[in-house]
């Protein structure tokens, strides 16, 4: 197996296997896991677009886990935005602007995947519009308002602790390494924007004002990492 060994180990442990004893890992960065898998030299690997589309076009293998749709992984954020603790304290306005830009871009991807897929092609990030559109259209970008960020940290911290990869408790990680103030404020503001798009002309609608509103895998997800001297300030549905 190859690529993203931490996430793969969590997946393996989640289904009751011992990642140290039950699997033989291939982690040489010089190897090409897609080609090895297509040639039958390895049994599985964690794939990211466009690898999944390429394998499907070659009729090689099948998806055994997609964390954008399969529980429990699909119930949590795939990614977290991490910032240096000192920078966040010194430059709160800049931090909020960066987070706002990311969330705004996330909403753009959710609302117009055809446009953004074409931008990826025009920008030279990929030559396949169909692959880009399939990827953008298959990721629940709009769900960032609905998921629980703190519960996501708790979920991954428990998995990492159970697998022996970290020693800290979820409670300590959440207490020492997270700050949701910026995100919560932007979440209320962006939530109001979404509501306005669907409101009737009658502006007396009760929620109009923000203050009234409360392992071949096709996924493009990775587990969150908590770094020393860093704080998680928000989240990004990739």
Image: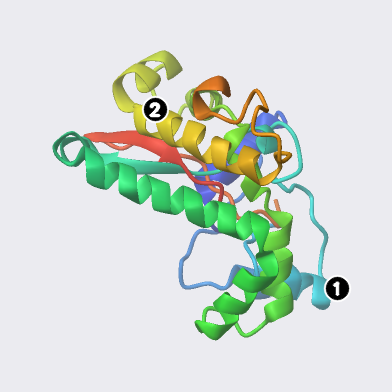
| Front label number (1 vs 2) | 2
Name which residue lies at 44% across and 52% down. 102
59 with respect to 209 (left or right): right
Tell me if mark 2 has few (under 14), some (14-19) or many (20+) residues whose alpha carbon lies within 10 angstroms of its own: some
Residue at left offset 60%, top offset 59%: 109
Can residue 33 be seen in the rendering of this structure? yes
In this view, 54 is above or below 85: below
* Label 2 SS: loop
227 vs 45: above or below: above
Residue that carries the numbered disc 1 in the rendered image: 59
Q: Is residue 61 above or below residue 68?
A: below
Please tell me which residue is depicted at 44% across the width and 29% down the height of the picture.
184
Residue 100 in the image, given as x and y percentages of width and height = 40, 47
Viewer-side residue, 148 vs 54: 148
Quarter of the figure that contains the N terminus: bottom right
Q: Nearer the viewer, residue 190 or 233?
A: 190
Near mark 1 (Cα within 10 A), the count class, few <14, some 14-19 or many ≥20, is few
Residue occupying the point 74% across, 76% down = 130
Q: Which mark is residue 180?
A: 2
């Amino acid at each position: 197996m190859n690529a993203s060994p931490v996430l793969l180990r969590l997946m393996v442990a989640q289904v009751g296997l011992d990642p140290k004893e039950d699997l033989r890992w291939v982690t040489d960065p010089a190897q090409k896991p897609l080609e090895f898998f297509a040639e039958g030299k390895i049994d599985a690997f964690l794939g990211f677009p466009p690898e999944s589309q390429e394998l499907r076009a070659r009729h090689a293998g099948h998806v055994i886990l997609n964390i954008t749709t399969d529980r429990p992984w699909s119930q949590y954020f795939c990614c977290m935005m991490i910032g240096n603790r000192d920078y966040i304290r010194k430059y709160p306005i800049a931090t909020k602007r960066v987070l706002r830009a990311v969330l705004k871009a996330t909403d753009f991807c959710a609302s117009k995947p055809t446009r953004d897929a074409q931008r990826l092609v025009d920008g030279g990030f990929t030559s396949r519009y169909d692959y880009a559109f399939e990827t953008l259209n298959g990721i629940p970008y709009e769900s960032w308002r609905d998921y629980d960020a703190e519960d996501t940290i708790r979920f991954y911290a428990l998995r990492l602790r159970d697998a022996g990869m970290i020693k800290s408790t979820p409670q300590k990680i959440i207490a020492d390494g997270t700050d949701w103030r910026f995100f919560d404020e932007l979440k209320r503001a962006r939530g109001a924007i979404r509501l306005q798009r669907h409101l009737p002309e009658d502006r007396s609608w009760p929620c109009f004002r923000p203050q009234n509103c409360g392992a071949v895998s096709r996924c493009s997800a990775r587990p969150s990492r908590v770094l020393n001297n860093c704080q998680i300030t928000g989240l990004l549905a990739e």
